[in-house]
Amino acid sequence: MTPTAHHPARALLTLLALVAGLLVAPTGPARAVPGKPPPLTTPWTSQALTGTPLPEYPRPQMTRPDWLTLNGEWQLRQSATDDPPQFGTDLPDRVNVPFPVESALSGVQRAANDNRHYLYYRRTFTVPPAWSGRRTLLHFGAVDWQSTVWVNGRQAGTHTGGYDAFALDVTPHLTGGSNELVVKVWDPTDSRQHGSLPPIGKQTETPDGIFYTPVSGIWQTVWLEPVPTASISRVDLTPHLATNTVRVRVHTRGDVSGHSVLAEALDGGTVVGTATGGFTEFSVPVPHARRWSPDDPYLYDLRVTLRAAGGAPVDRTTHYVGMREITTGMVNGVLRPKLNGQFVFQLGTLDQGYWPDGLYTAPTDAALAFDLQKHKDLGFNMVRKHIKVEPQRWFYHADRLGLLVWQDIPSLTAQNVDATDAQQAQFEAEAREIVDEHRSSPSVVAYTVYNEGWGERALADTRRVGQNVKNQDPTRLVNVHSGHNCCQSLGDPGTGDIDDWHVYLGPAAPSPSATRISVLGEFGGLGLRVPGHEYSPSGNFFAYEWQPNPTALTDRYLGLVAGTRNLMIGKGLSASVYTEITDLEGELNGFLTYDRRVVKMDQARVRAAHLALIEHSTRLGSTAPVALPTHARRSLQVTTPGHTNRYLRHRDSLAFTDVVDAASPALLRQDATYTVRPGLADPGCYSFESVNYPGQYLRHSHSRVRNAPDDGTALLRADATWCARVGLTGSGVSLESYNYRGRYLRHHDAQVWLSDGTGGEPWNQPALWAEDSTWAVAAPWAP
């Protein structure tokens, strides 16, 4: 287990990990098959197969001292048909569990389009004698996709789902000596074999572009654990900040009649709160609780003891909890996400979790933590785990490092979506398992249910599934459909906590509403090629926009960050997800190369920009409506430092800024004076009528601002209506377009435009956007 200097109570978990390290295999160090040469090596490739692969304790959120890893060399048989399992006989191939068979580290590295969708795994194991008298659980971190398990020739159980953990009680099937374990896996990926349609995320048998090499079979740790006859199976932890308590619900297996639960909160090894309860939710005090956040990811331990009727301890597990809450609420009239009651802009990347050596499976635990640490190094505070669910240890690393996690539900295929009722039900069942498995992780603050219409059948289904996830875990935000404005989406479901657009390159954003925060769920995709550090199974390389060198890439990216900041200030954007943290197969738009060896941008400049944006979000000024004097004449004065002697005026119908003073010609002073009228499209906003051309109003057309006569059309009246807000700089007034919310009256190079400051045209560049879009409503030059 990774040391956690910030949290002394982690010492207990570290101790458990050290104990576990002595039990990595039944008869000494597990062997590993030699790996195949990967297309690219990572800094951890050479370490992955030295000894037992991924030997760390696999479930940090619920620990017990005794366990046994079954990672390492297994036998393997691959078949194109659903053959009966073979017992008591060697299988022809060897594979390193838990690396998927398509990966180089598996030692198999089979082709993406291999049609042998049936995999048969075999190995033997011996249960330690010290476990006698207890039940033995066989755990699988994740197996893609449909599994059947036999122990000593007897079926022990089945499971369907490629991204969730499952456990089987194999005690009735064990012998005192060597035990044979056989696992059959059927993983059709997107082949549609036998009419299948499993959740697969980005996997495809024809990898190219934004879809990647499939992963089949066992891809997370397999392990054994002894438990009492009556035992704890899961503990759900929910912080409640208003009362400084953590709500605890204990799930069990076996007969717990008459049993009770003792829960103890520990801070630095010291018990600070205790409570007893049963098997419904009860509260444990955490006095003066230190709040968990990306800036201070403090974790308390929670010790849970199952006790018999007389009070004797029967089972004990140790957990951890971060005292934090995620909600939404109004901030200066804009609905925002709030972490512990404070709006903090959630700034993250798309993280797809692919590796050139292990594919879905990171080569080592240090590698698993690396991408998350790199997010922190770059100044991000959030990560969107995209169309994949990582092992429990990944969530632990996010918890201890302090990253907010948006967890996607892995989707059905993005192509030819025609799910049957049974297939839809299976997708929903897997979603429920994912939510239950990670509901106690403090880093997880949002679930994304659908992405760009992948697997979507009907809007009614989309809304229903989103609401079901919210009902299942109401303590987190639900993003019903990320990128509902994109691709094959059936449209905006209008439900959930989040309104999410995808815009490449962007940035751009929807307007927040009274019920949904505004989010830019994907944008960016700037690409840079780094020869020797890139790989594509198809030979094609893709990015949304190519840059020639690291300096140009960094400059362009920082422009996007500045545009994102302007959307936060002016339109109410509350979160953004940049594509993406690392390059992938054929997709070269990462901060890092696919092999994690090169950071492609200037990390110091990027970090500074990110931290500045996040800091700005915590002190956002009000953008509340401002009252202007109707039917009174006023002049609009520039507030940009160095240009405050300039005023908005019209000339040949177009709007400009010009220097105006008492000595200016009468015509210029008239051109720079408007009568404030109730808004032509909305009397709650305003229109500006020219003093010397009555009946003409200040309007925008193709982003340029000009005078135009009121022709009575709805378009003119909307274009000529401006909503007055507290200035974007915190003082003065900013004039927001009535029909293009988030775009403001802005001067640039003496001309006047409608701008959101997100980049592109010179008049829309992010620099000085807030200053240029803030005006003083001054005394009229033509009274």
Image: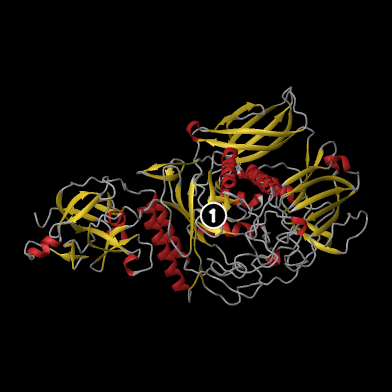
Residue nearer the viewer, 306 or 313: 306
Is 458 left, or right, of 723 in this rendering? right
Is 390 left, or right, of 719 in this rendering? right
The colour scheme used to paint the residues is: secondary structure
x then y, percent, for residue 202? 64, 60
x then y, percent, for residue 435? 62, 44
Residue nearer the viewer, 638 or 14: 638
Q: Which residue does the numbered mark 1 point to in the structure image? A: 383
Q: Residue at x 59, y 34 (%)?
A: 265
Residue 204 visible within the image: yes
Residue nearer the viewer, 725 or 579: 725
Residue 269 visible within the image: no
Number of numbered discs visible in the structure rendering: 1
Residue nearer the viewer, 578 or 607: 578
In the displayed structure, 305 sits above or below 400; it is: above
Is 462 left, or right, of 726 in this rendering? right
Can you say which quadrant of the picture contains the C terminus? Answer: bottom left
Q: Secondary structure at mark 1?
A: strand
Q: Residue at x 63, y 31 (%)?
A: 263
In the displayed structure, 9 sits above or below 282; it is: below
Q: Residue at x 44, y 66 (%)?
A: 557
